[in-house]
Image (spheres, helix red, strand yellow):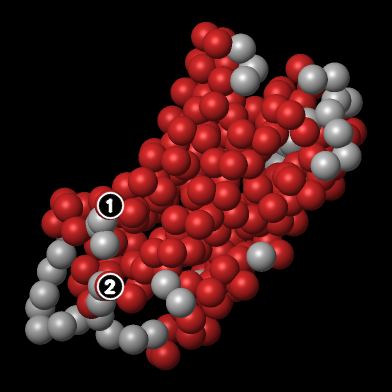
Amino acid sequence: MGIYTSIISGGFALGPFILIMVGTQGWPPFLVAVAAFLICSFAVLAVLSRLPSLDEGGEKASIRQFIPLAPVLLFAVFVTAVLEQVSLSLLPVYGLSHGIGEREMAALLGVLIAGNVALQVPFGLAAERWSARVVLIACALATALGCLLIPFLIGTPLIWPLIFLWGATSFGIYTAALVAFGAQFSGAMLVAGNAAFALLWGIGGIAGPPAAGAAMDLIGVQGLPLVLGIMCLALALARMARA
């Protein structure tokens, strides 16, 4: 799961760099996207014969059935999506408001993504060896602490290691949620749960930036770390309350 989420983060990082190389005008960016999906199709076809069967005597499951079984895990996916999309879209705005230049903010985003990629395997191993629940709570609390520290360290050299670790723990929430999900469910419910994870990721990615932007408009730029920190703290408390 750690390798899987590291690759996801790498894909998020690769997208903008591809646009830098091919531009945003005309056919090239669309052709790159088509090529990427074709490569995915060939990869799936290559392993199709080795994929396990999920047919368990005709058992069926739906997203509606899955949601009551794992509400906290779904909330974890939602929070991770919000963190990911808000940090990529609004963290540069936050930095510019503190007098940080565009080049430095671009570098900070690169460090954040590097943290996403670098530490997911250790988080996955920790979740497997000890407890996915403990790793999820620890990552949520660490991310909330990072949100608290960002306003104080944004103009200092300490912001660089903080952003690296903050990026790692924020995506570590998703890694731990995936490990817990895989350990608890199988068969048709695993398929339904995967669809529910994708649904909550989409909702979080769409709702997060407008909500955080509204908070910044309402209470100032510190609304960004405040909203994210509250969400992470709420997730940690919810996971503590539910075994």
Q: Amino acid at mark 2?
A: Gln
To which quarter of the image does residue 29 belong?
top right
Task: Identify the secondary structure beneath mark 1.
Answer: helix
Residue 241's disc is 1
Taking the image as shown, residue 182 lies to the left or right of residue 41, namely left
Which is nearer the N-term, disc 1 or disc 2? 2
Q: Kindly tell me whether residue 211 is visible in this rendering.
A: yes
Check disc 1 and give the amino acid type: Ala
Left or right? Give the position of 187 relative to 112: left
Tell me the residue at 46%/77% (across/down): 130
Image x and y of residue 27, in percent: 71, 42
Q: Is residue 137 above or below residue 109?
A: below
Residue 187: image location, x then y, percent: 23, 77
- What's the mark number on residue 32? none
Residue 179 location (% of width, % of height):
42, 70
Location of mark 2 (residue): 184
| Rendered view: 225 above or below 74 | above
Q: Closer to the camera, 218 or 46?
A: 218
Q: Is residue 9 above or below residue 188?
A: above
Which residue sits at x=54%, y=41%? 144
Question: In which quadrant will I find the C terminus?
Answer: bottom left
Along the horizontal axis of the image, is 163 left or right of 143?
Answer: right
Marks 1/2: CA–CA distance:
17 Å
